[in-house]
Image (tube, helix red, strand yellow):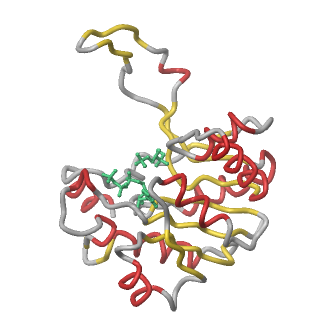
């Protein structure tokens, strides 16, 4: 169950409204991206780290991290394209894909994820939805969904690499864009992805309102 960790960091953080990529923001004295790099550097089954950077950040990323990761690849326009580029670099049989924007990682949850990945070939961390979720039409509330059937997807997501590569290639041929990799597995392979319980603290740094929360969590 040795794996390659792919850390996606090639976004621009538009919703944060900073003048630089949000993953370089320092929270509690450490850059957001450093939490993920540090975790995977120390996780025993992680044998390789592929970091995905935007073209704009590449020189800085190389300067700061080339000695800590196996390789740094330039990502694409979307997260999906960034993952695809990194998959082509990954050398191990399994991959764990993680958003650099999610700095809180629990090693117990990763242990569960890695175990599940070996049985199902495609697994993710996810948490039960606690709010009432409603489909809308304009500003009208159209339909309340059964929250017992809903989970919120987190990362890392873990895959048998060749299976995920196959799904990505088919998605590219169909010009399909997903917001996460389990969707590609479900649509383009015969495997039904699974999930294991994640952690509510694993929020994705998205807007400035998330900063004080992460200051407490990290
Ligand atoms: N083309 C992209 C877009 C996103 N990401 C990464 O995927 C993760 C989740 O994406 P998101 O939170 O949407 O980050 P941004 O795209 O940077 O944010 P925004 O949508 O506000 O611009 C982040 O770690 C981000 O760096 C990526 O590697 N390549
Ligand atoms: C992969 C992800 O973090 C799971 O919740 C999420 O879908 C990324 O979406 P984003 O719009 O690229 O932030």
Number of residue marks: 0
Where is 2 relative to 212, above or below? below
Q: Quadrant of the C terminus?
A: bottom left
Where is 75 relative to 203, above or below? below
Residue 115 relative to residue 15: left or right: right
Residue at image coords 41%, 79%: 58
Q: Tell me residue 182's x, y (percent).
A: 63, 42
Residue 35 relative to residue 215: left or right: right
Residue at image coords 74%, 73%: 91
Q: Tell me residue 17's x, y (percent).
A: 18, 57
Q: Quadrant of residue 41?
A: bottom right
- Front residue (pair 218, 135): 135
Q: Quadrant of the N terminus?
A: bottom right
Q: Tell me residue 118's x, y (percent).
A: 79, 54
- Front residue (pair 51, 201): 51
Where is 164 relative to 143, above or below? below
């Amino acid at each position: 169950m040795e794996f390659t960790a792919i850390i996606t960091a090639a976004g621009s953080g538009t919703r944060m409204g900073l003048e630089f990529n949000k993953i370089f923001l320092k929270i509690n004295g450490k850059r957001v991206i450093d939490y993920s790099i540090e975790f995977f550097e120390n996780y025993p089954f992680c044998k390789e780290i592929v970091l995905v950077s935007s073209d704009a950040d590449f020189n800085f990323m190389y300067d700061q991290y080339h000695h800590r990761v196996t390789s740094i690849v330039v990502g694409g326009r979307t997260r999906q394209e960034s993952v695809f580029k990194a998959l082509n670099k990954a050398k191990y049989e399994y991959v764990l894909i993680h958003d650099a924007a999610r700095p809180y990682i629990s090693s117990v949850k990763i242990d569960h994820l890695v175990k599940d990945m070996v049985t199902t070939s495609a697994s993710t961390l996810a948490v039960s939805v606690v709010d009432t979720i409603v489909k809308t039409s304009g500003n009208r509330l159209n339909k309340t969904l059964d929250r017992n059937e809903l989970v919120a997807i987190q990362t890392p997501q873990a895959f048998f690499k060749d299976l995920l590569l196959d799904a990505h290639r088919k998605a590219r041929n169909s010009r399909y864009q997903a917001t996460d990799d389990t969707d590609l597995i479900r649509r383009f392979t015969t495997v039904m992805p699974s999930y294991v319980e994640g952690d509510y603290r694993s929020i994705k740094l998205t807007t400035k309102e998330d900063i004080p929360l992460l200051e407490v969590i990290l």
